[in-house]
Each structure stands twice: as structure tokens, then as C-alpha cells.
Image: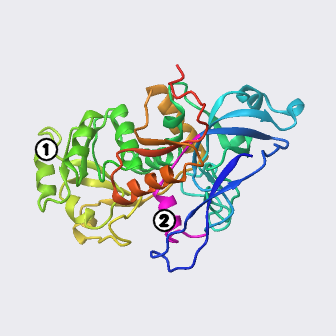
């Protein structure tokens, strides 16, 4: 029987409890009209999954499989005789699954945020999740996977990709030649923002608490970086900016904390801080200096199906390969999967943490 992976509810307070992983056996589902049966090849972790295990995420389901990111092969169509030409073209082809539900195309935000929008994986609002060997989804919940990606690279892309794309493109509105700061390099979203920006011709600087991660980011095209543990990292960064454009056009930030105070002097008038997370704390100081400088603070998270499709098309066109930190094989490899969660808790990863579900899947790029 195929496997799925869920979390098991145990007693404990949010932030103190740590829900254990539970391996389940499930039947292979049958697709209905307008649906596809996908055999999942790989799935990836996000910080959201760690928050779920700590009871720090809303609307947790203990029956829906974990994880939002997935790459797989379409193996069957529901009602093949009446399947659309698009569905027929996807049969036996690799696909990426959309990581959320309830947000079609509105650039302002989900069309029905209060009732319908959710990221899949251990969510009460959706039975879907990619920590399973087989999944049935509606046809419009998949896109053809870029042919140059391995299964692990494909699984590494969806949620961080659409989150980073929205933060950088929709919200920050960057263009070739701009100067951008990306904080917390090493995390999945920050790395995707870096890769997207470099491909666009944007000059990128990064922050990290690890000099090794800054060096690796420079290998991916970053102009340079600073250690956020240094008291004067903002001054150091200012000294790195080019003489012909000695300011930042935008900051793409997932940390929060004192980022406004640190960067307001470096941002151009009307510059943008695009904030997709607050790992330092749930609050961010807003300074009068930023208001006087016309700086815009824009909150953002996840993205729509339209943004997801645009992001995948960009990855395909520019042959971008998401950074994979580590892969373990087998959905039943609980010890190995726990090791991935341990990497995330300790901040050891540089890139995405991936489970290769179909251990017979070809891990070579599809060229």
C-alpha cells in the first residue's frame, strides 16, 4: 500500500509541543472528471511545516498529509474521453503542483481570504498535501515542470518560488539595474529571490550570520554581503554600493526586527521594503524617518496561481535551478526526514530540504 505522512496530535502548548510524524498506508485514489492522478516523485519542506509541528500555525489538520511542495508524473486522467486537450498533453509528463488553494489571479491578495485560501499540507481547508505517494488534483492545480529540472529541484521550487516572485516582482517591482538587499540568505525564499533578481539583471547584496553562506551567495551571482551579527552591518553595506548608484532601490526581507532602521538611510526616496516574514519577532519598528523619505513598506506572502505560472515560465526561460541543500530517500524514512527537520531547526540548510518519494525516479535533469 502507498504511504502518506501526517502529524499526530499530542498534548502541549504552542511553541512547546512538537507533534510527531505519523506514517500511514493509503489506497491509490481515483481521479474524477477534470482531475489528474499524479504519482509524486519528490516533496520539499518549508518553515511552515516546522511551525505546524510546534502548533504555531493556524488551522492544522491531523489527517491531511504534510507538505506543500511537490513534483510528480501524471499517470491517469479522470474520464479520459472527455478530458481537455491540456490534460491529455500532461499525461505521463512531469508536473509541479500549485502549493495553495483559493487564490486565482488578483494581485491585491486572495479572492476569498477569510474562507477559501490556504497553503496545502496539514490544512483543515484542503485535503491535499504532497507528503504522499499518490495524489488526485484538479487539472488547474498543476503546471508542466521545466524540462531542465530534476525531481528534487522541481520539488524545491513551488512555495518559495511563488513567495519570492511576488515579493520581488509584484511588490518590490524591481527592474534591471536596480540595487536590492536580500536578507537571511540560505533560506529557500531568499535564495529564489537572489536567483530571480540576478537573472533579471538586478544587483543583489545579502545578509547572513554565516560567512560561508555569503560566499555561496556570491557564487550564485550576489555582488557581496554582510554579517547581520556585526553592529555596523548597515554601514558596511553602504560602503559596498556602487558610486554611480549608491543606494538601494528595494529590500526583500524575511526577518523583520530592526530592518527599517538599518536600511532607511540606504534606500532611495520612495524605495520599497518588501516583507514576507518576521523570523526575528512578530513586530517591526516603523520610523518617522522612513515616512519622511517616502519609503514604502509592503507586506506579502505566498502568491496567486497567475503569479505561480509566471514564475515557472521565468524559471523555464532562464534555466534557473533551485538550490537543494539535502535530499533523503523514502517517505517511510522517518529518521531521515526527522534529520531534515533538525537541519531546519538549527538553520544548517543552504537551500531546500527534499524528500525523494519515488526512490526509482530518475534524478537526472530532463534536458
Crowd rating for badge 2 (residues with CA inside 10 Å; few <14, some 14–19, many 20+)? some
Which scheme is used to colour this image of the protein?
Answer: rainbow
**Where is residue 166 drawn, in percent x and y?**
47, 48
Residue 341 vertical placement versus 88 (above, below): below
Q: Secondary structure under badge 1?
A: helix
Q: Nearer the viewer, residue 354 or 193?
A: 354
Which residue lies at the image location 35% right of the left edge and 72% below the top edge? Answer: 283
Instruction: Report the side of 359 relative to 281 (left or right).
Output: right
Instruction: Report the side of 93 relative to 328 (left or right).
Output: right
Give the mark nearest the N terminus, 1 or 2.
2
Magenta-span inclusion, residue 53 = yes
**Where is residue 167 drawn, in percent x and y?**
42, 50
- The quadrant where residue 174 appears: top left
**Where is residue 67 drawn, in percent x and y?**
57, 53
* Residue bearing mark 2: 51
Q: Nearer the viewer, mark 1 or mark 2?
A: 2
Magenta-span inclusion, residue 298 = no
Instruction: Report the side of 48 relative to 361 (left or right).
Output: left
Report, in whole angstroms, how far the alpha carbon at label 1 lies from the one at label 2. Answer: 36 Å
* Residue bearing mark 1: 240
**Where is residue 335 drawn, in percent x and y?**
50, 53
Which residue lies at the image location 33% right of the left edge and 61% below the top edge? Answer: 255
Instruction: Report the side of 1 relative to 148 (left or right).
Output: right
Which residue lies at the image location 12% right of the left edge and 62% below the top edge? Answer: 231
Residue 104 vertical placement versus 94 (above, below): below
Q: Secondary structure under badge 2?
A: helix
User: Are the residues flagged by discs 1 and 2 in contact, CB closer than 8 Å?
Assistant: no
Q: Nearer the viewer, residue 283 or 40?
A: 40
| Extreme residue in the top direction | 367
Number of numbered discs on residues:
2
Which residue lies at the image location 54% right of the left edge and 23% below the top edge? Answer: 366
| Magenta residues (range) | 42-59
Amino acid at each position: 500500500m502507498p504511504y502518506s505522512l501526517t502529524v499526530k496530535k499530542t498534548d502541549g502548548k504552542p511553541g512547546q509541543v512538537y507533534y510527531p510524524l505519523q506514517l500511514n498506508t493509503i489506497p491509490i485514489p481515483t481521479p474524477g472528471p477534470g482531475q489528474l492522478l499524479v504519482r509524486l516523485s519528490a516533496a520539499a519542506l518549508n518553515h511552515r511545516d516546522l511551525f505546524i509541528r510546534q502548533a504555531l500555525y493556524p488551522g492544522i489538520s491531523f489527517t491531511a498529509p504534510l507538505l506543500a511542495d511537490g513534483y510528480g508524473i501524471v499517470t491517469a486522467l479522470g474520464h479520459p474521453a472527455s478530458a481537455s486537450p491540456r490534460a491529455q498533453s500532461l499525461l505521463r509528463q512531469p508536473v509541479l503542483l500549485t502549493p495553495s488553494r483559493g487564490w486565482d489571479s488578483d494581485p491585491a491578495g486572495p479572492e476569498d481570504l477569510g474562507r477559501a485560501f490556504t497553503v496545502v499540507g496539514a490544512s483543515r481547508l484542503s485535503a491535499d498535501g504532497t507528503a504522499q505517494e499518490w495524489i488526485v488534483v484538479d487539472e488547474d492545480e498543476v503546471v508542466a515542470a521545466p524540462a531542465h529540472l530534476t525531481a528534487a529541484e522541481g520539488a524545491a521550487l513551488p512555495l518559495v518560488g511563488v513567495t519570492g516572485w511576488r515579493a520581488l516582482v509584484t511588490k518590490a517591482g524591481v527592474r534591471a539595474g536596480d540595487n536590492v538587499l536580500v536578507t537571511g540568505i540560505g533560506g529557500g525564499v531568499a535564495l529564489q529571490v537572489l536567483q530571480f533578481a540576478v537573472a533579471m539583471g538586478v544587483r543583489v547584496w545579502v545578509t547572513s550570520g554565516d560567512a560561508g553562506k555569503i560566499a555561496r551567495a556570491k557564487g550564485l551571482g550576489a555582488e557581496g554581503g554582510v554579517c547581520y551579527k556585526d553592529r555596523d552591518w548597515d554601514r558596511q553595506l553602504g560602503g559596498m554600493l556602487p558610486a554611480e548608484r549608491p543606494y538601494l532601490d528595494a529590500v526583500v526581507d524575511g526577518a523583520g526586527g530592526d530592518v527599517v532602521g538599518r536600511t532607511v538611510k540606504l534606500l532611495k526616496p520612495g524605495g520599497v521594503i518588501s516583507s514576507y516574514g518576521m523570523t526575528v519577532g512578530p513586530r517591526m519598528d516603523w520610523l518617522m524617518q522612513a515616512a519622511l523619505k517616502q519609503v514604502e513598506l509592503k507586506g506579502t506572502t505566498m502568491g496567486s496561481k497567475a503569479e505561480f505560472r509566471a514564475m515557472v515560465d521565468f524559471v523555464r526561460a532562464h534555466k534557473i535551478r533551485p538550490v537543494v541543500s539535502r535530499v533523503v530517500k523514502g517517505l517511510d524514512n522517518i529518521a531521515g526526514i526527522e534529520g531534515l527537520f533538525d537541519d531546519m531547526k538549527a538553520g544548517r540548510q543552504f537551500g531546500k530540504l527534499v524528500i525523494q518519494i519515488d526512490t526509482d525516479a530518475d534524478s537526472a535533469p530532463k534536458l
